[in-house]
Amino acid sequence: MAGDTLIIEGLAGKKRLKGSIPVFGAKNNVLKVMAAAALIEGESSFTNVPDIADVASMARILEGLGAFVSRSGETLSVNAKELSGTVVSAEIGKSIRASVVLIGPILARLGSVTFPHPGGDVIGERPIDIFVSGFQALGAAYSHDGDSHTFSAPGGLSGGEFFFRVVSVTATETLMMAATKAKGPVTLKNCAMEPEIGALANFLASCGAKIEGAGTPTIYIQPSVLSAPQKPFRIIPDRIEAATFLTLGALAAEELTVTNIEPSHLDSILEAFSRVGVLLSIGKDSITVRAPDALRPARLRTHEYPGFPTDAQAPFTVLLTQAEGESAVMETIFDGRLNYTAELVGMGASIAMVNPHRAIVKGKTPLKARDIAGPDIRAGLAYILAAAIADGTSKVGNAHLMDRGYEKIEKRLAGVGLQIKRI
């Protein structure tokens, strides 16, 4: 296996993990506020920033455009006063999907932006047509040359109204950021409602933006003058990381407390745990989970927030392999996101693909150790969970993909009793 590999000694179904494991700042919040900092002719600071590869990649893109990025511990600062570049690095931009959110701030501030077709995880096609339609509705011109796309609005973006034909988190965030510098009011309809969007709006508001409705289907943005925020902005907890650790606890914990979380962001996940028979003790900023003696089967359907998040689907599917009966998993967001299940079948799971968006899981099936290459961030973590409950020693390759979204994952898991090391 190329690159770093994680070696995991499986618990063979025993419930031995215990202690507490912290959740760090949300990847999908920090990347977006870093992009938003490109709107500001000054310095923006952020705290509770995870030390992950995607943050480093976003920093390199911003520096390539003329910004200065610095870090001290959990605090990261972006000074975009000298931002002047309008071409997003093709090499780095293709490596992370979140690079696409930079197009809004750069276009709004500098009047033009050229960027590569977004990359990231291999979980199905992620077209940019909704971005094209959105920026054209705000008065931008669009052209493309191969995999390179360009928006231009030398006179500034106009106000206006745009309806998202499909709910899109990144498109909602990108247009909301750009709209703060439009010449007139902007109304965005059928918006995504994820907590990270509300957090992004809060950061922009701290810079002087006038935004109403973030976190609802309709967002209103008034023209405003942006300036550097007066104090650091704290990144919200990563709800996907929280869901992943809670799932591990439901599989293999004597008693596991997941700390530094926001329980109100986890409603759909907590409801799913309740359906399969997992008992949780919910505190103000922590949740304690104990693996039950038996798990009930369930039908799981991913959906835009506040529905069950697609990024938590793979770990929860591992949980369903240990439920006693037949479960169904329906992936409604991405094509190809269930492809990882083939490796779980190789570990002994009974999973049948009905079509690219639906799988039937029959349990309970004991899992056996296997050498696997993680295909993306979320499926890679699902493989770690499967290896944790398997019988024998597993190797999960492509650890660098997990490093994109999870800081020091092996150290945190080892801290609650899992035998895991990196080579």
Image (spheres, rainbow, N blue to C red):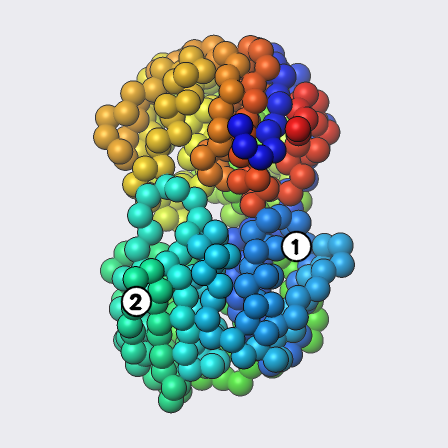
Q: Quadrant of residue 100?
A: bottom left
221 to 381, vertically: above or below: below
Residue at horizontal 41 percent and vertical 78 percent from the top: 112
- The tally of labels here is 2
Residue furthest to the bottom in view is 155
Dot 1 amino acid type: Val
Residue furthest to the right in view is 72
Q: Could you classify mark 2 by the number of other residues whose Cα lies within 10 Å: few (under 14), some (14-19), or many (20 or more)? A: few
Give the residue pinned by disc 2.
Answer: 145
Mark 1 / mark 2, whichever is N-terminal: 1
Residue at horizontal 35 percent and vertical 31 percent from the top: 339
Residue at horizontal 31 percent and vertical 33 percent from the top: 330
Q: Nearer the viewer, mark 1 or mark 2?
A: 2
195 to 222, vertically: above or below: above
On the question of residue 212 being in view, the answer is no
Q: Is residue 348 left or right of residue 68?
A: left
Give the residue pinned by disc 1.
Answer: 49
The percent position of residue 359, horizontal first and vertical second, equals: 30, 26
Q: Is residue 392 left or right of residue 308?
A: right
Residue at horizontal 45 percent and vertical 63 percent from the top: 101
Label 1 secondary element: loop
Q: Is residue 327 left or right of residue 99?
A: left
Label 2 secondary element: strand
Q: Could you classify mark 1 by the number of other residues whose Cα lies within 10 Å: few (under 14), some (14-19), or many (20 or more)? A: many
The percent position of residue 172, horizontal first and vertical second, equals: 39, 63
The percent position of residue 122, horizontal first and vertical second, equals: 39, 42
Q: Marks 1/2: CA distance?
A: 36 Å
Seen from the viewer's position, the closer of residues 411 and 323 is: 411
Seen from the viewer's position, the closer of residues 256 and 232 is: 232
